Amino acid sequence: MNIYQLLRLNRVVKNHRIKFLALYLLHKFNRRYLAVNFDPVLACNLRCKMCYFTDSDYVKTLKGQFKEDDLELIAERIFKRALKLQIGCGTEPTLYKGLAKIVALGKRYKVPYISITTNANLLDEEKIETLLKAGLDEFTISLHGVHKKSYEAFMKKASYEKFHKVFKSFEKLKLKYNFKVRINYTFNKDNFHELSEFFNHFSGASFDVLQIRPIQKIGNTEYNDFDLETIRSDYGRIIKDIKSACQEHKVTLLASDKIPIVGGLNSSSFIFDYTFCYISPNKFWKPNFKWREQTFDEFSKEIAWSKVLRNNMFKSKSELKNINNRLNYEIEFY
Ligand SMILES: C[S@@+](CC[C@H](N)C(=O)[O-])C[C@H]1O[C@@H](n2cnc3c(N)ncnc32)[C@H](O)[C@@H]1O
Ligand code: SF4
């Protein structure tokens, strides 16, 4: 079963009690159930206008990176429990020198799916191949504009030419390696319509999945127009056109038929907080986890984690609070 099938299963099973029973059993029997989201370095080479990297106060709080010597221990602590390893969640992973080592450690600990989320501007064919050889399954590539003008305006400091060069390398390497490329297009009212020209600029042979997601408020960002009402009437038609273009090019489209309500609760989101594990130089899964001194199992016992999972089976949906104020890439709303 691949990760997309699992995500679908999470949506198909509506009953949160069954999901928590499954999580409880997976935890109890030392099985994998975590989505490990790993930011090894708290920095970015770009300053995308929609992103908190244009919020100077927030950027001041982002500092530091893991020492390469820490990676083995991090992997030992958590990778055995990871169903998916997502490298690059809130910052830019390609700035980290030990990136291929993280992928290789994921592979060594048999994590079923290893993915990198990146703006791709620091990648080249050699680096891509190194990551593939280390065992990477997927590149998730962020895009905020189809045309050069909007791309470079929204993704400040990025180069449209470098970006396309990376897609040429993907196309070439796809003949030799088995891996997926997912484009994550964050839309707002000013970059939405150009999506209808997507396949005039990108070859369907260079990527597998096109994910179209609405802008969210994630800080005091330079671009701050979150109103999507002006595109509501065009939305359905444009998505329908993209859908048929994607079918023609054998690309999977992940997009909602209607403009999604950002932050809305759905049945898939209830287990999110219990499977999501964020690791950065400032955080490791949960507060008070002394990962250098104790194991995942020791700390889980300390916080009675299995009891938390079990008790959630008996809670109503309204009792289960969901934290929605962070980017959530695993719960698709299509
Ligand atoms: C914060 S970035 C970190 C990973 C990496 N630097 C990248 O851009 O792929 C993660 C994702 O957030 C998306 N993003 C940035 N600003 C956003 C916003 N205001 N609303 C929704 N998604 C946003 C980016 O397009 C990217 O796919
Ligand atoms: S979206 Fe990604 S690439 Fe753009 S500024 Fe934010 S972290 Fe950097």
Image (cartoon, helix red, strand yellow):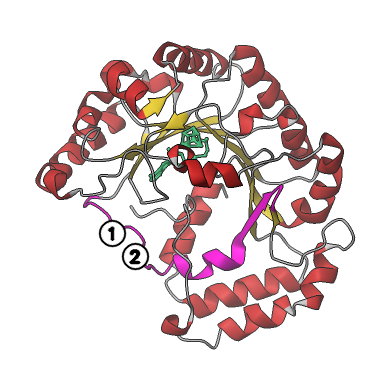
In this rendering, position of residue 11 left or right of residue 34: left
Residue 283 coordinates in the image, percent (x, y): 69, 55
- Tell me the element at label 2: loop
Q: Can residue 208 be seen in this view?
A: no
The answer to whether mark 2 is within 8 Å of ligand 1 is no
Find numbered disc 1 in the image and state the secondary structure of the residue it sits on: loop
At 27% across and 55% down in the image, what residue appears? 260
Residue ID for mark 2: 264
Tags 1 and 2 touching, CB below 8 Å:
yes
10 Å crowding of disc 1: few (<14), some (14-19), many (20+):
few
Q: Is residue 132 magenta?
A: no
Residue in the foreground of this view, choosing between 47 and 132: 47
Give the amino acid type for the residue marked by disc 1 in the picture.
Answer: Ile
Magenta range: 257-282
Q: With respect to residue 184, does 228 lie above or below? A: below
Residue extending farthest to the right is 293
Q: Please give left or right for residue 44 compared with residue 127 in the image.
A: left
- Disc 2 residue type (three-letter): Gly
**Residue at (22% x, 27% y) in the render:** 194
Q: Can you see residue 207?
A: yes
Provide residue 47's location: percent of width, then percent of height.
46, 31
